[in-house]
Amino acid sequence: MRRPPLRALLTLVIALGACADSIGPSGNDPLEVAAIIPAPGAVGIDVLTQVTLTFTRDIGMESVPGTITFHAGEHRARGTVWRQDSRTLVILPMSPLDFGTTYTVTAARTLADADGTPLGEEFTSTFTTRGSAPPSPDVDQLREFVAVLAHDSLRGRGSGTEDEARAANYIATLFSTYGLAAPTDDYIQAFRAEAWQGGMVDSRNVLGTVAGAGSLADEWLVVGGHYDHVGVRPVVGGSVEVHNGADDNASGTAAVMELARLYSSYVEAGGTGDQARRSVMFAAWGAEEKGLLGSCAFAESGLLSMDQTMATINFDMVGRMNSRVVQVHGPQSSTPLTHFVADANRPELNLLEDPNLSCASCSDHACFRDAGVPYVWFFTGMHEQYHGPDDDYDLIEFDGTADIAEIAFRLLTRLAITPEALAFNPTF
């Protein structure tokens, strides 16, 4: 028989190889993961990464739902899984990842190829993001903040009073100590506005900034809560009662101050590495009890353009959490915020938006929302001591306030670095 030419033999081998590859291994062989990016055990991974899984055979897409999971410790991160090609699945996280955190990717054995042959064994791989892990709020610091602000000596921090001014000076001193910069030549922003009951109020906001970096530095986030309360009120016999406002809103102010302390230190220590990030304004609002006067004066002052303000986080009454439930209002003001808040919830609190809340505009996010700025308002609910003389330090649940501050810190870092601006939902 005549020997075929070498070129014909090579062509035949290549053709058979291609055919064998298209057929794949025997149907009795299990499906396997051929490759994963980031590689197993990788460190220093970008917090804006996606995860790519490549398999040895075509994937049966009907088997995919519920088989791919993505965790940081016990916390399941949100992500969408989509098919890049017949053998490749991509996990797209719905928010930036935490810095300095180990993530685990798992593919369950119920994942199958196009012929229904399952994964041979559960597949698990880990990687660690760049930077430093988010710090935990200090419960003792929160206690100290509330103890000072809700002490009888500040006489309830009445809006526009000298007592409110003394509280403002205390906050300004701490902002300076924590390394925050004053946005002008002072941490105090004085303003004069008309109270909702009538009459003019002279009050002040306390403002401190942490500068951003890179391409996002000219955009802003605002983290705030009001520090004033209702002051003293006369009682029968000619004396007065002090309304200390430990929950309303020394608790929220304490959360703002603790975030300012932690975030400034975290950035200074390089916790976010060289990641581009937005600038942050930390704010203690004055004269909220007279009609949101401080936050609205700020929003209208032009100190920050609302067009350059990406979002605001508001704390108002966060000291009375029960059964690990916290009300979180406003994520629907921009669709991604819902995912950002859920991914930030590493304390695993029960997040609730109370449909019975009678006043969606009765806190300091309102003027930002009216200017088209997405917002999140943390709130632990009403109670019998509201605006009464018994809203005191000893009723504050500080561990719960710390958990709320932890969610807020993780939310803040996500908002600071996400490349896309949040689109405001005007129907919310």
Image: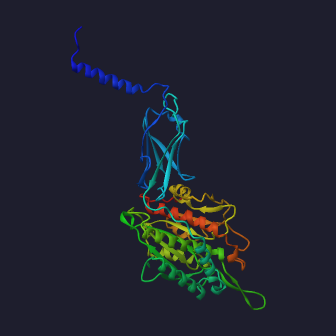
User: From the viewer's perspective, is residue 40 above or below residue 56?
Assistant: below
- Residue 200: quadrant of the picture: bottom right
Outermost front residue: 41
Outermost right residue: 237
Q: Nearer the viewer, residue 146 or 44?
A: 44
User: From the viewer's perspective, is residue 14 above or below residue 238?
Assistant: above
Q: Give the image location of residue 229, x and y in percent.
A: 63, 79
Q: Is residue 418 left or right of residue 11?
A: right
Q: Give the image location of residue 266, x and y in percent.
A: 46, 68
Q: Nearer the viewer, residue 183 or 424?
A: 183
Q: Is residue 326 left or right of residue 206?
A: right
- Residue 399: quadrant of the picture: bottom right
User: From the viewer's perspective, is residue 408 above or below residue 192?
Assistant: above
Q: Give the image location of residue 165, x and y in percent.
A: 56, 86
Res 427 seen here: no
Q: Give the image location of residue 270, x and y in percent.
A: 41, 66
Which residue is drawn at the image coordinates 57% and 86% (left, top)? 166
